[in-house]
């Protein structure tokens, strides 16, 4: 998939490479998640690449495996995590890792704080709407 912006073509892989240097989970957290969800070594490799923003084709090329094999591993991850898409998978990993490895000021903690703030704001709105009715 390509996106054209200001006469430049930008691929998904280019976008993903911008974010690949951001580390939301460290090796200790990944190890915890691997144990919790009984992930294989290959599922772990694929989960890490998905969480870095790589698409299935990029993952297949990176690991020198077929696109269909990547899809199978991702489907197995969805089943183990009880999720239906890659974003939910990332959020599940972040949420589960944060229970044991919270670190103030880290990108992980900032993401969790933002999610909690949004949930609190939504609850406030709901209460205000109910009070008006």
Image: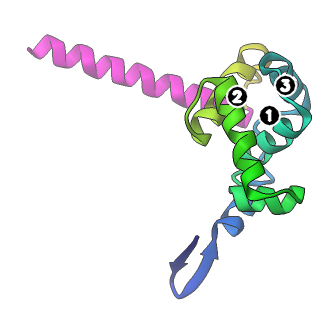
Q: Label 3 crowding class (10 Å Cα cut-off): few <14, some 14-19, many 20+?
A: some
Region in magenta: 106-133
**On residue 93, which mark appears?**
2
Residue 11: % across, % down: 64, 72
**On residue 7, which mark appears?**
none
For the residues labelled 1 and 2, say whether their Cβ atoms are less than 8 Å apart: yes
The part of the image, by quadrant, that contains residue 119 is top left
Q: Nearer the viewer, mark 3 or mark 2?
A: 3
Which residue is at 72% across, 46% downward?
Answer: 50
Q: Is residue 43 left or right of residue 122?
A: right
Residue 120: % across, % down: 42, 19
Q: Nearer the viewer, mark 1 or mark 2?
A: 2
Q: Magenta stretch containing residue 73, yes or no?
A: no
Q: Which residue is mark 3?
A: 34
Q: Magenta stretch containing residue 128, yes or no?
A: yes
The part of the image, by quadrant, that contains residue 128 is top left
Q: Is 80 above or below relative to 106?
A: above
């Amino acid at each position: 998939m390509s996106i054209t912006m200001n006469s430049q073509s930008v691929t998904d892989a280019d976008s993903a490479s911008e974010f690949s240097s951001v580390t939301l989970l460290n090796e200790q957290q990944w190890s915890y998640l691997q144990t919790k969800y009984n992930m294989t070594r290959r599922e772990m490799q694929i989960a890490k690449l998905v969480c870095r923003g790589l698409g299935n084709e990029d993952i297949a090329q990176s690991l020198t495996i077929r696109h269909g094999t990547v899809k199978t591993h991702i489907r197995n991850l969805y089943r183990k995590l009880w999720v239906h898409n890659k974003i939910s998978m990332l959020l599940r990993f972040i949420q589960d890792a944060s229970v044991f490895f919270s670190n103030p000021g880290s990108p992980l903690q900032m993401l969790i704080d933002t999610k909690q703030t949004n949930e609190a704001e939504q609850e406030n709105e709901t209460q205000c709407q109910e009070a008006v009715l």
